Amino acid sequence: MLFSENTFIGVDLSPGKKNIQYAAIDDQLELLALAQGDLNHLLTFLRNQQQATLAIHGPARLNQRILKDAERREQYLIPLGKGRPGNMRVAEYTLRQHRLPTYRTPALAADAPPWMQTSFKLYSALREAGYQPFNPEQPLQRKYVEVIPEISFHAWLNGKVLPANTLHGRMQRQLVLYEHGLKVADPMTYFEEITRFRILQGILPKDLVYSSPAQTALAAAYMAWLLEKQPNTLTLVGIPEEGQITILENLIHKAD
């Protein structure tokens, strides 16, 4: 599907999932696409976009061992907490210092789990297709950023986040997306669909509350929208040569 206006796309590369989930919204937060497929399927969709802002839940590249190099840590003014620095990127270390959820990206490709290796392939293919890293000083037709949507859910819900693998957790996440203006199904409608007869028959509504990967992709798409519409609400953490992560700006200040 080809969209002529700017499209805001979220991609979820969560571990343990066979297919990649993606979501696309427009300027008015209307849902344009919510689907899943393999890497080739996703790339076909992304190559068809004339103008797109893409937010990916997955690392852009391996860590460059900056945390383990005292000279480079000093160069980048990276303070270390207690204990030895782990095998991760500076962005991930920064988030952990602020007690925010994140993954750990290793220095060697052989140590990266399959979902991360898929993420590296995606970023490489995007660059070949003409997508470029987001640059606030340079207008780009097709650009991408790395995000961790679970961090955004923690911010939007003031840390009172229910487990994503439960119905109540999924309803909570979808409700906060709905209240932020995304044109998604109102999860509270779920309760209107439940009757005594339906419960006894084991017939429960399935399409009103999206899957956890779908909600993650939708949250990422909303982050892409914020990048264009409300850029002052976001900030970057990490070092460009390793790949930076885009998060809500107030998270760092709240944790300080």
Image (tube, grey):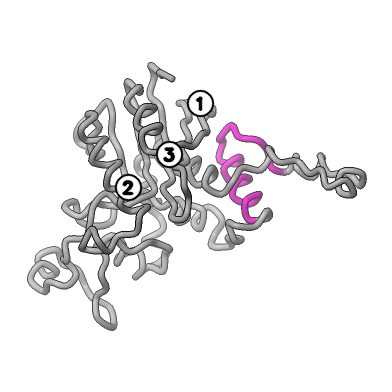
- Lower position in the chain sequence, tag 2 or tag 3: 3
Tell me which numbered mark, 1 or 2, is placed earlier along the sequence: 1
Q: As displayed, is residue 132 above or below residue 79?
A: above
Query: Which residue is label 2 attached to?
Result: 119
Residue 86 in the figure: left or right of residue 225: left
Question: Distance between the Cα atoms at labels 2 and 3?
Answer: 13 Å
What residue appears at the point 50 percent right and 40 percent down from the top-left corner? 218
* Secondary element at tag 1: strand
Q: Which mark is residue 10?
A: 3
Percent coordinates x, y for residue 33 in the rendering: 50, 29
Q: In the figure, residue 158 lies in which quadrant? A: bottom right
Q: Are marks 2 and 3 in contact (CB under 8 Å)?
A: no
Please tell me which residue is depicted at 39% across the width and 33% down the height of the picture: 42
Image location of residue 162, percent across then percent down: 61, 61
Q: Which mark is residue 32?
A: 1
Crowding at mark 3 (Cα within 10 Å: few <14, some 14-19, many 20+): many
Of tags 1 and 2, the one toward the viewer is 2
Residue found at the far bottom of this picture: 83
Span colored in magenta: 169-187
